[in-house]
């Protein structure tokens, strides 16, 4: 935190992730509450992710060329405006499902600017010998957001309605943008000559040629398909099978965040060099165990145990993943490689969510077992597809 500018950047990151957590939880609960449709909830989660994933190479090229802070602020502002628009249109009873999905797609398009921009700032601002600790803060920033924001979203939806949860998310996005205002924007001078589209293509080629980034993408995309199922399945489980309310959903995600925060901070104090793949494997197995417990859940106590296991997996997985990606990516390509890598990694989330909607309408239990199968499949990839030693950086360079 004594690194110049790091505390402000971290404050903005936590506020932005709180905004994202409030928005994600509130959006699913809002759709289930207003439209009573798991299918539409899954489609909304799909539209909130996929467009940003598709434009991520261009976003990465913009980050490497024009800097990060101003583009992160732009995305936060657009997120606040679109969330406010959804809430206002809903209050006016002028939000049919197609319009909802259209606004969500618009909001998604700039998403890579913030989540890749902030992630690529960590290895630029923090000295290399502090990467594990910085990544522990990075991971804990995500789980702190889940710990504080998810219960807030659930309570607001339960007592005031989904629209107010979306407005709260927009307000947090504006606060996150304010924390970054006038932040000195460190940059890494690199291969950013030529047009933006040319640089986007070169970033895609670099990422695909990098064996570590390819292996991470296979691991995360499969793992996140299971997580995408859970984003829809857990609220339906709590609301329908256990007959509890939206506040309970938020509290459960908060419990996951609390366990994950402790896990991440403890893991961040341990050197990961040479052990990143094993940490990721163990974390995925723990996550699979938690998902399996959910499939048998008949009361809230069992759900709490499952959610705690999912939170426990967060620390070793995130710290191992973040540090490995930083070590094996040329700093000149951080913006492009991180944007594309993170998009490939997260593509499983919208796919899992859009599958979960109709499958849950048929059988919630079947959806939960699908999440178990996907998570177990993901556990095979860290040791099989990610190289044990760092490959030559030159072998990944385009051309």
Image (cartoon, rainbow, N blue to C red):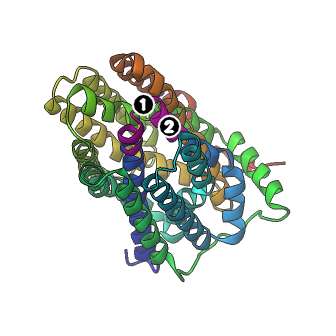
Q: Position of residue 3 (x, y in %)?
A: 43, 77
Question: Measured along the vertical axis of the image, is residue 82 above or below residue 395?
Answer: below
Question: Which range is magenta?
Answer: 30-46
Residue drawn 54% across and 31% down? 351
Residue drawn 26% across and 37% down? 307
- The secondary structure that dominates the magenta segment is helix
| 266 with respect to 115 (left or right) | left
| Label ID, residue 349 | 2
| 47 with respect to 207 (left or right) | left
Residue 33 lies in the magenta stretch: yes
Question: Measured along the vertical axis of the image, is residue 180 above or below residue 272?
Answer: below
Q: Position of residue 357 (x, y in %)?
A: 45, 27
Which quadrant is home to the N terminus?
A: bottom left
Residue drawn 44% across and 43% down? 276
| 252 with respect to 120 (left or right) | left
Residue 389 appears anywhere in the view: no
Q: Position of residue 146 (x, y in %)?
A: 32, 52
Question: Mark 1 packing: few (<14 Cα in 10 Å), some, or many (20+)?
Answer: many
Residue drawn 55% across and 70% down? 73
| Label ID, residue 38 | 1
């Amino acid at each position: 935190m004594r690194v110049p500018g790091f505390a402000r950047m971290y404050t903005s990151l936590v506020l932005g992730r709180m905004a994202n957590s409030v928005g994600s939880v509130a959006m699913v609960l809002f759709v289930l509450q207003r439209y009573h449709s798991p299918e539409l909830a899954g489609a909304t989660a799909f539209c909130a992710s996929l467009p940003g994933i598709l434009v991520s190479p261009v976003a990465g090229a913009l980050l490497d060329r024009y800097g990060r802070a101003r583009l992160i602020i732009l995305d936060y502002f657009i997120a606040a405006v679109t969330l406010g628009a959804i809430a206002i249109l809903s209050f006016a009873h002028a939000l049919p499902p197609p319009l909802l999905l259209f606004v969500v797609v618009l909001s998604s398009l700039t998403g890579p600017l913030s989540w890749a921009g902030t992630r690529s700032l960590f290895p630029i601002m923090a000295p290399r010998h502090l990467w594990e600790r910085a990544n522990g803060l990075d991971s804990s920033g995500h789980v702190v957001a889940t710990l504080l924001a998810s219960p807030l979203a659930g309570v607001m939806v339960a007592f005031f309605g989904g629209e107010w949860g979306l407005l709260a998310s927009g307000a947090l996005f504006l606060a996150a943008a304010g924390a970054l205002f006038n932040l000195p924007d460190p940059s890494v001078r690199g291969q950013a000559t030529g047009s933006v589209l040319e640089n986007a293509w070169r970033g895609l080629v670099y990422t695909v040629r990098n064996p570590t980034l390819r292996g991470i993408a296979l691991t995360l995309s499969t793992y996140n398909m299971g997580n995408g199922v859970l984003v829809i399945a857990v609220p339906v489980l709590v609301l329908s099978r256990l007959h509890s309310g939206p506040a309970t959903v938020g509290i459960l995600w908060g419990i996951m965040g609390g366990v994950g925060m402790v896990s991440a901070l403890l893991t961040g104090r341990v050197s990961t060099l040479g052990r990143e793949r094993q940490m990721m494997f163990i974390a995925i197995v723990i996550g699979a165990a938690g998902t399996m417990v959910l499939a048998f859940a008949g009361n809230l106590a069992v759900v709490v145990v499952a959610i705690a296991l999912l939170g426990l997996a967060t620390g070793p997985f995130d710290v191992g993943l973040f540090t490995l990606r930083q070590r094996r990516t040329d700093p000149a390509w951080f913006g492009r490689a991180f944007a594309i890598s993170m998009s490939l990694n997260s593509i499983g989330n919208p796919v899992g969510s859009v599958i979960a909607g109709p499958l849950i309408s048929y059988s919630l239990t079947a959806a939960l077992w699908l999440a178990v199968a996907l998570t177990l499949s993901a556990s095979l990839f860290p040791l099989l597809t990610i190289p044990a030693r760092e490959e030559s950086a030159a072998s990944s360079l385009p051309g």
